[in-house]
Amino acid sequence: MVIHSGIVKYLSIDGLGIVRLSTGNWVLLRNAFPGDEVEFTIPNSEQSLQEKTILGELIAVKNFHYPRRKSPCIHSTQCQGCPLIEMSYQDQWKEKILKLKFYLEKFQWASHWNISEEAMEWGKAENEFSYRNRGQVKVNGDLVGYVNIFQDPQKNFQKSSKIVPIEECLVLSEKSQQILKKFRSILPHPLSFPNPPEKFLWNFFDFDEGIDLAQMDESENFLKDHLNKRRPFSQGNQTQNQKMKEWLKQNLQDEPQKTEIVELFCGSGNFTEVMATMHLSRNNEPHFKIYALEVQGSAVQLLKLKNLHGVDVIEANLFQSNVWKQFSHQFQNVEILVLDPPRSGVKFQRAWPNIMPNLRKILYISCNLESFFKDLQEFRKFGFQLDLNTLRIIDLFPQTMHIEILAVLTKS
């Protein structure tokens, strides 16, 4: 077996260390951080080297760039859901900022960008554990846990089907921990086994802090209502979510009354509610006219139930190019676009400049650097520029490489 050596250059979005071989292949390694001098093997090397990106197996770290700490989680070696847990939080945050700088240079938005001290402190997580207010576990009988997507290094990038049992998850909030503990207590149950087993490997349980613990006492009804049912999307870190709401509010603070806003991917109204309640008059007249669009039906229904003044809630497939024709008259006076898309980005529609000819400002909240900068390239073609002074990075999920980007684009 050939032992390779190299220096880890980057971290992938999954928190895996990236080493480049002399052949040009990129090798991903668990438990390897940027700057580490490592030795590793490549399972099935002859076949794997035909792929551009390969999952390798770490043999040893000869020199550590970042100091390691002992993982406080008993499940971390098997679960791998918190790939940065052996790195101090300060070093995690440093790597996330470096990742953003890398993309700014890659997409030629800035060759030398330095985040201000104020912005750096603002984006840091207040708690590196006990923050996550939602989650999803896989279930098979009384077996409850997460699936490590890279369990078998012999099968390059093939997802594992093995559930890693989880007794306690350190990143979950106290209420989420209580929900998970209570859920485990009502198992096994005939409904908790996958059906039919030859077709499904497991059930899944989506949960968030909106679940009533008392409902679990009626275990059969609870499992019928919650197993394999997705909860409406919500931000997973309430403290950091509040900061994002304040950022949005600050960037709309000076906008005049009756400004028209389109919000895409509004979900159940996390940011819609902020905009709808800004500058309310004494008789509760809304300051803005808001068109809130979402793909998912259940989220749309929840937003409608809030009955927010000045908000038109619209259900539409936002990724279909022909859907925009119906808004050609409705959006003529829209001046601001608010975006909080899924990881795939907004997939810029060329019809937008014609449908929203008065658009002058875009407030973009993104959870994926790659799709974010690809979208920005398209907006740049239509005269929108990124204001680097207002660019913010915020850490919603410590122990992972996930970051949120908050950006203001203005028409030049």
Image (cartoon, grey):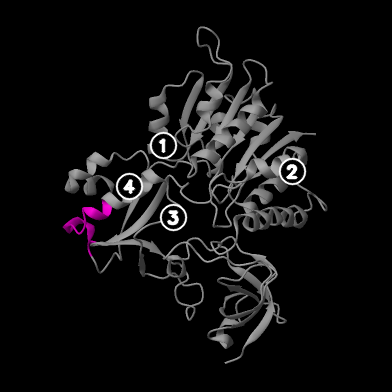
- Secondary structure state at the residue bearing disc 3: loop
* Residue at mark 1 to residue at mark 3: CA–CA distance: 28 Å
Label 2 crowd (10 A; few <14 / some 14-19 / many >=20) = few
Q: Amino acid at mark 2?
A: Glu
Nearer the N terminus, badge 4 or badge 2?
A: 2
The mark nearer the N terminus, 2 or 1, is: 2
Looking at the rendered structure, the secondary structure element under dot 1 is helix
- Depth check, front residue: 305 or 190: 190
Q: Is residue 78 above or below residue 409?
A: below
First in sequence, mark 3 or 2: give its number. Answer: 2
Question: Which quadrant is home to the N terminus?
Answer: bottom right
Q: Which residue is labeled 1 in the image? A: 299
Up/down of 257 relative to 150, above or below: above
Q: Which residue is mark 3?
A: 170
Count the marks: how many?
4
Q: Which residues are magenta?
A: 183-196
Q: Position of residue 240 (x, y in %)?
A: 55, 40
Residue assigned mark 2:
117
Give the Cα separation between the discs numbered 4 and 2.
37 Å
Q: Position of residue 364 (x, y in %)?
A: 63, 39
Cα distance between the residues tagged 3 and 4: 12 Å
Position of the C terminus by quadrant: top right
Q: Which mark is residue 352?
A: none
